Amino acid sequence: MKLLALETSSDACSVALQCDNQLLIDHQLAPQQHARLLLPMVDQLLAKAGIKPADLDGVALGCGPGSFTGVRIAAAAAQGIALGADIGVVRVSSLAALAQSVVREYKAANVLAVLDARMGEVYCGAYVVSNNANAPLTNISEDRVCAPNDVALPDNTGLSEWVLAGSGADAYPDDMRKLGQANEKPKHVANCWPNAQDVLSLAMPDALACHFVSAADAVPVYLRDRVALTTQERERGETL
């Protein structure tokens, strides 16, 4: 299996390539530089593996939610590569990729993934590790956008030892400290980002089963209808 993964929903610009038994990764914290960096990063990984886009079996896309501009950059690149190579795409939630990154790095079992959505809001989703090889990570609360003080641990799950991670958790620490009971507060790990390596691993079961969508259906997930700033907001330097 030759699968390329793209993830640009946050400050991280991230590309990963599974080429048979070889795993190649380029993950950079590069705010607002994704448009400049992404395709050269793809070219470099393909060159290291000694393959061309036409040799790929598919593309895995971190489809959001996240930065509107960043998610569109990855989606456009995935669509272009998939169309040019006549291959399909596997779409992966960027919140799931963030959660999988925390599972991989911190051996967590239950992750509350929270990304900064700007405009005083966050994207959040609760994920737990499962024993299902076809779905190694399960979303037990639907990904949503909300105010930071509306983020909550899932009720009545019987699960404990939650790990809290993501730019939203980092941006609103006072709101996140309100989560959980005194003896069951989630552990906060800072500076965690969605990573293409984890988009790749989450997409692999669907790729191996040939559960792809067409390039035309490789579209972003926004969760929020507002995708543009007013002139005054842009002049103030605000971002989405």
Image (cartoon, rainbow, N blue to C red):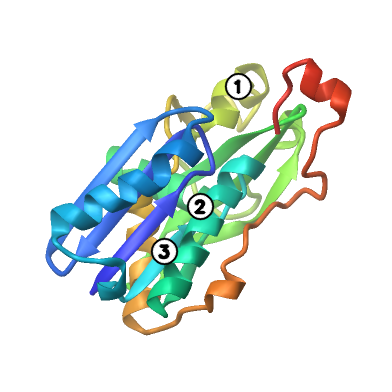
Q: Residue at x 32, y 51 (%)?
A: 42
Q: Which quadrant, please, contains the N terminus?
A: bottom left
In this picture, residue 42 sits left or right of residue 70: left
Pick the front one: 114 or 204: 204
Residue 113 image point, x, y percent: 53, 42
Task: Look at mark 1 in the image and give the residue it sits on.
Answer: 171
Pick the front one: 58 or 196: 58
Residue 84 image point, x, y percent: 43, 72
- Please tell me which of labels 1 and 3 falls first in the chain: 3
Pick the front one: 139 or 46: 46
Q: Give the mark toward the camera: 1 or 3.
A: 3
- Please tell me which of labels 1 and 2 falls first in the chain: 2
* Disc 1 from disc 2: Cα separation: 24 Å
Task: Look at mark 3 in the image and give the residue it sits on.
Answer: 60
Residue 51 versus residue 232 in the image, above or below: below
For residue 74, which numbered disc appears in the image?
A: 2
Q: Residues within 10 Å of mark 1 (few under 14, many from 20)?
A: some
The reply to whether residue 157 is visible in this rendering is: yes
Please tell me in which quadrant of the rendered image residue 67 appears.
top right
Q: Which quadrant, please, contains the C terminus?
A: top right
Q: Residue at x 45, y 37 (%)?
A: 36
Q: Residue at x 25, y 70 (%)?
A: 2
Farthest bottom residue? 210
The reply to whether residue 185 is visible in this rendering is: no
Q: Residue at x 62, y 58 (%)?
A: 220
Callout 3 secondary element? strand
* Disc 2 from disc 3: Cα separation: 10 Å
Instruction: Give, as a three-letter code, the residue at label 3.
Output: Ala
Instruction: Give, as a three-letter code, the residue at label 2.
Output: Ala
